[in-house]
Image (cartoon, rainbow, N blue to C red):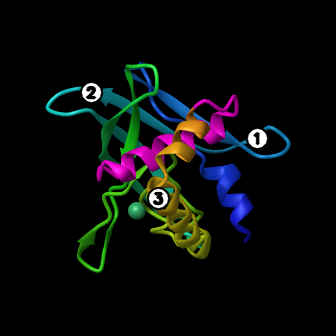
């Protein structure tokens, strides 16, 4: 299993305004391979409740999951804000709490978690953070990226700015 299959399979779009619904993931020939239901509430804090049925690998044993994922509001470049997930995973008794734009549910896994928790691309996580930390110390470079027409650059600048402010 390659990490690219997790990426295609588990990419989870950030939630903006809807209240409830479902998300389906399809394979190459358009068959639905997995689906979840969700509901979004603002009270007592922004959160996304997800529900899905998980089949234990190699068995027919099914398990119904229903839990919530807290959302963080992260300010955007032109005012307003965007929701980011707060990774709900607990590893070795320590909560992850990373703010992420994607959560993953690799085949056989039970709960959604960020890619660092699943160590999908552990090394690149480290390198990525290092690069962003370096960028955060260079306000001019952050400013230049913010004005880039490339949304990826803008996102990088946004993350670096949050690191500089000690939020991320
Ligand atoms: Zn995590």
For the record, the magenta segment spans 147-168
Residue depth check, mark 2 versus mark 3: number of the one nearer the observer: 3
Q: Secondary structure at mark 1?
A: loop
Q: Residue 83: image x %, image y %?
A: 39, 33
Of helix, strand and loop, which mostly describes the magenta segment?
helix
Q: Secondary structure at mark 3?
A: loop
Q: Residue 2: image x %, image y %?
A: 74, 69
* Rendered position, 26 above or below 21: below
Q: Which residue is mark 3?
A: 114
Q: Which residue is mark 1?
A: 31
Residue placed most toward the observer, 79 or 50:
79
Q: Is residue 87 left or right of residue 101?
A: left
* Rendered position, 154 above or below 87: above
Q: Is residue 11 left or right of residue 69?
A: right
Q: Is mark 3 within 8 Å of ligand 1?
A: yes
Q: Is residue 52 magenta?
A: no
Residue 138 appears in the figure: yes
Q: Is residue 155 left or right of residue 80?
A: right
Q: Which mark is residue 41?
A: 2
Q: CA distance from mark 1 to mark 3?
A: 25 Å
Residue 65 appears in the figure: no
Q: Residue 153: image x %, image y %?
A: 63, 41
Residue at (70, 34) in percent of width and height: 150
Residue depth check, mark 2 versus mark 1: number of the one nearer the observer: 2
Q: Is residue 159 magenta?
A: yes
Circle 2 Cα neighbour tier, 10 Å, few/some/many (<14 / 14–19 / ≥20): some
Q: Residue 156: image x %, image y %?
A: 56, 46
Residue 26: quadrant of the picture: top right
């Amino acid at each position: 299993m390659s990490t690219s299959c997790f990426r295609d399979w588990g990419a989870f779009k950030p939630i903006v305004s809807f209240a409830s619904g479902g998300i389906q993931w399809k394979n190459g020939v358009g068959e639905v391979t997995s689906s979840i239901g969700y509901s979004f509430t603002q009270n007592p804090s922004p959160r996304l409740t997800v529900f899905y049925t998980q089949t234990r690998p190699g068995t027919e044993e099914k398990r119904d999951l229903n839990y919530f994922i807290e959302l963080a509001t992260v300010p955007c470049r032109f005012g307003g804000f965007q929701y980011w997930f707060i990774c709900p995973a607990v590893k070795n008794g320590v909560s992850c709490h990373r703010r992420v734009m994607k959560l993953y549910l690799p085949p056989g896994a039970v709960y959604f978690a960020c890619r660092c928790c699943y160590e999908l691309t552990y090394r690149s996580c480290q390198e990525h953070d290092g690069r962003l930390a370096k960028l955060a110390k260079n306000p001019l470079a952050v400013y230049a990226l913010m004005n880039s027409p490339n949304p990826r650059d803008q996102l990088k600048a946004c993350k670096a700015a949050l690191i500089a402010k000690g939020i991320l």
